[in-house]
Structure formats: C-alpha cells, structure tokens
Amino acid sequence: MKAPRLFFFTFLTFIMVICGAYTAKYSENTQGYQKSKEEWFFKAISRYPVSITFEPIVLFDNGDYVEVGTEPVGSLDRVPSKSNRPKAWGKWELKGGRYYLTDHKGRTNDYGLGSGNWFPAFPYRPNPKLARIYQNTCSTDIGYGSTLTISKVTFIDGEHFIEGENMGGLTPNAATWEKSAHTGTYHIEDHIITLNFSDGKQEKRSFAVSPKGNPAIPNPKMIFIGGDAYLAEE
C-alpha cells in the first residue's frame, strides 16, 4: 500500500529534477520554431499537500490565455470554451521580460523563463524522435484514502500505439485496481495528436514537447498529451 505512494512522489521528484535544469530562454531561432500566432509554455504548480504538477498554457496574441485541456487549441471555439471552462481562461501581459497572468478572478501571478516554474513548450517534429514509452501518474486524496492512476502510452513505431491505464483505490484496509488498454494508429502534427482506435473511434488531443538547453530546443523526455505531462521511461 505504501509502494504506489512512494512511486508517485519519486516520479514527481524525477520530473522536478529534469525540469529544474530547463532554465531556458528564447532566442530568435527558438521563437522561429513556433510558427503559429500562439505561444506555448508550461508552468510548474505546487499542490496540497506535497506534489508538483505541470500545466501547459497557450498565450494568444489578443491578450487571452488558456490552460490547455484535451481539445486541441486550434479547434477551440473561444466563446463557448470560456463559458464551459471559465477557470481555464485569463489575460496575460509581458513586461520587463516577465509574463503576468491574470486569472478569471482577477488574481495576477508573474512568471519568467529561467525562474524554474515557466518553460517554453514546442510543437512536434520528427527529430528528435519520441521515446517508446511514456507514463503519467496522478494521485488524489479522498479523505479516507486516495486514488492512484497510472497512464502509459507506447509508441510501437511511427504509426501504431498502445494506450493503457491502471486505476486503483487505496484505503487503510484495502487496495483495488482496474486495468484497461486500447490500441490503434496515431499521427502527430504540430500541437495535435490524432488517435485512431481499433474500435473505430477517433480522438484529437493537444500535444506539446518540453525543452532543454539555453537557447531552448525540443526535448522528448517529457511531452504533454491532452494537457497532462508524460515522462519518458528509461
């Protein structure tokens, strides 16, 4: 029962170590890499009691920002999206090299490249290659226990994938687990991954790649699928 919790915090610590090294800033070449009018970043967020999550953010040229969700940003209809997900939207400004984000309640926080909590996010390109297996781990306290979800995506080759998930409930007296898996084909273009499942269903999700170095370049050690951070398995 303690092992999943230990694994969860080890996983988060590993991501923190990797992303702590990304004290990256844009150069002219880096900015040229992002061809769309939007700018993609991700930020580190501390959550109660002790955890770190990473959240992709898109800054629009009209001063709006949105916290990236499952739906690809390019297909967002902003008016209904702001109504359906008001907490995900806000305003941004760039002043003195720092980004000021004001949320839907009027609260402002500032972020800067090289500060350890604000990083550029890149669209997909075939080079560098993606890793074979990526994993996302999420834990939620529910008062009398907690839930743990471990999601894995395996890119078998340049076309086929397996998506699996282990979901469990942990209480002082018991642990329960459920497993699921899906297969199909995939295609990634810029910030969109299209999944064609073997049952005929198709899903389009947002997609982004983390950075490394200074100036920043894409680093497939960590990717974002549908707004969630996935870490490459060694």
Image: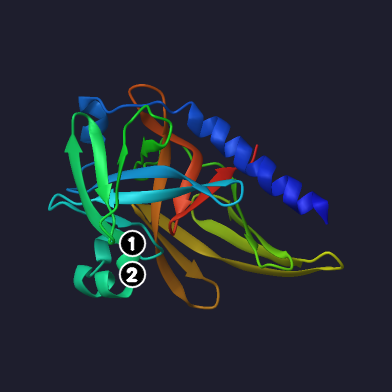
Q: Nearer the viewer, residue 48 or 234?
A: 48
Residue 17, image quadrant: top right
Compared with 107, 212 (above or below) is: above
* Proximity of marks 1 and 2: CB atoms separated by less than 8 Å: yes
| Residue 85: image tag | 2
Compared with 5, 96 (above or below) is: above
Q: Which residue is drawn at 54% across and 49% down?
A: 230
| Residue 88: image tag | 1
Residue 65, image quadrant: bottom left
Q: Nearer the viewer, residue 92 or 178?
A: 92
Q: Which residue lies furthest to the right in this view?
A: 173
How packed mark 1 is, by other alpha carbons closer than 10 Å (few <14, some 14-19, many 20 or more), is some
Q: Residue 72, can we see it?
A: no
Counting from the top left corner in percent of width and height, residue 34 is at 25, 40
Colouring scheme, one of rainbow, by chain, secondary structure, one colour: rainbow
Position of the N terminus by quadrant: bottom right
Q: Residue at x 42, y 36 (%)?
A: 117
Position of the C terminus by quadrant: top right
Counting from the top left corner in percent of width and height, residue 85 is at 33, 69
Q: Which amino acid does label 1 sit on?
A: Ala
Q: Which amino acid does label 2 sit on?
A: Arg
- For numbered disc 1, what is the local secondary structure? helix
Say whether residue 190 is left or right of residue 2. Answer: left
Counting from the top left corner in percent of width and height, residue 40 is at 30, 45
